[in-house]
Image: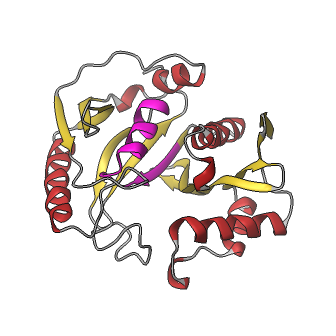
Amino acid sequence: MERATDPIVIRKPKNIEELEEFVNLQQSVWQFRDLDIIPRRMFVVAQAVGGQAIGAWDQDTLAGYALAIPGIRNGRPYLHSHMLAVRPEYRNRGIGMQLKFAQREDALARGIDLIEWTFDPLQIKNAYLNIEKLGAIVRRYTPDFYGASTSPLHGALPTDRLHAEWWLHSQRVEALAVGHGLPDCAIKETVSVTFVSSSANDTLLPSQDSGLELLMQVRQQLVSAFARDLAVLRFEVLPNKDGCYLLGLWDESRVDGRI
């Protein structure tokens, strides 16, 4: 698997030394303490047992990478995409989306039709990418999923996470894969996300007291909506740069058809 998007080349790492660059970029982006760092051998194992380690290279520079591990739920195999990182100077160039669709291509070639990952409900850029650009849906919310984080990006807030489900054969994902927009869907409810303050990553600054209050509000609304069998189907960025989750019904019984 190799795909060139001049000058970026999306491909799997060729050797252990290139995997070392994945670890270095991880540390550069998240600035974890040793407790939370995923070591090189885990990237090696992920590749060996059916996961994914896919990089975006600008000649000899690793611009970004995606890491996924295999999982199984209710007898169904899937991939859990645990990390997606892009070097700051390469952001806003579509590299993250290229890496995700490379993951899709690799998964489909192996007969896997579902990739999942988690994301911070307050990160508006991530929400927009995951839902509007990739076509993922969301039906689950886990409070404090990772526990306390050593990354300064996460600050003092609980590591609440939404679970993105990327159904690779769904109509919405296939439409986006060929450059079309998301199909129309009926929206029944909305949940707004308001910035307390913006940072370079378009995320809430977690050190502010009002950040926890906002997180609790978003948590309560989304958990309540999911308990009523609603799913996040769209995401809207408002003129003031706030965000809005749009929820409706998702028919899982037809997921192997063309939803």
Can residue 53 be seen here? The reply is: no
Name the residue located 48 percent from the left edge and 48 percent from the top edge.
116
Q: On the picture, is 179 further left or further right than 221?
A: right
Name the residue located 80 percent from the left edge and 63 percent from the top edge.
18
Q: Residue 249: within the magenta? A: no
How does the figure colour the protein chain or chains?
Answer: secondary structure
Locate residue 133, reporting x and y percent. Answer: 48, 31
Q: From the viewer's side, name the closer residue of 122 and 208.
A: 208
- In the image, residue 176 sits, relative to residue 125, either above or below, namely above
Can residue 31 be seen here? The reply is: yes
Circle count: 0
Q: Which residues are magenta?
A: 115-134
Residue extending farthest to the right is 14
Q: On the picture, is 20 further left or further right than 128?
A: right
Name the residue located 78 percent from the left edge and 48 percent from the top edge.
58
Locate residue 157, reporting x and y percent. Answer: 27, 69
Locate residue 209, reporting x and y percent. Answer: 16, 68
Q: Which corner quadrant of the image does residue 179 belong to?
A: top right
**Image quarter of the N terminus:** top right
